[in-house]
Amino acid sequence: MRTDITKITEKTSHTGLTEGMHVYNAGTSRMFNTGEWRNNTPVYQEDKCKHCFLCAPVCPDSSIMVKDGKLLGIDLDHCKGCGICAEVCPFDAITMKEGIE
């Protein structure tokens, strides 16, 4: 049995789930706002950013929003606050703040 993850709710019984909760569809993480799990919040300072994009490929949650050669900000709905982006930024355009914004 394959579970349609878009139909899982709080009322879904255990018999309606895939054994081992395997997910067979790609791209389903965008359906869930997991940013509330974080303990630290990245703060993006646009005036310091040189758009080198060193942060984007290292983000495990693909939360660095880039469009048309510009870093637009951080998707806080999906960011888990790991701080990797802040560590790799050579311009201190991303810093970490304790707590959830």
Image: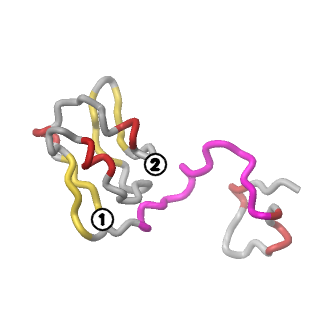
Badge 1 marks a residue whose secondary structure is: strand
Q: Position of residue 24 (x, y in %)?
A: 75, 48
Magenta includes 33? yes
Q: Could you say whether the residue bearing mark 2 is in a helix, strand or loop?
A: loop
Q: Is residue 74 left or right of residue 1?
A: left
Residue 67 relative to residue 44: left or right: right
Pinpoint residue 17: horizontal percent, then vertical percent.
Answer: 79, 65
Image quarter in which the N terminus is found: bottom right
**Who's the residue at 38% across and 66% down the image?**
38
- Amino acid residing under circle 2: Asp
Against 28, residue 10 (above or below) is below
Is 47 situated left or right of 98 in this image?
left
Residue at 28% x, 43% y is 73
Q: Position of residue 14 (x, y in %)?
A: 80, 74
Q: Where, by quadrant of the figure, is residue 96 drawn?
A: bottom left
Question: Residue tagged by mark 2?
Answer: 61
Q: CA distance from mark 1 to mark 2?
A: 14 Å
Q: Which residue is mark 1?
A: 40
The span shown in magenta is 20-37
**Does the magenta run of residues contain 63?**
no
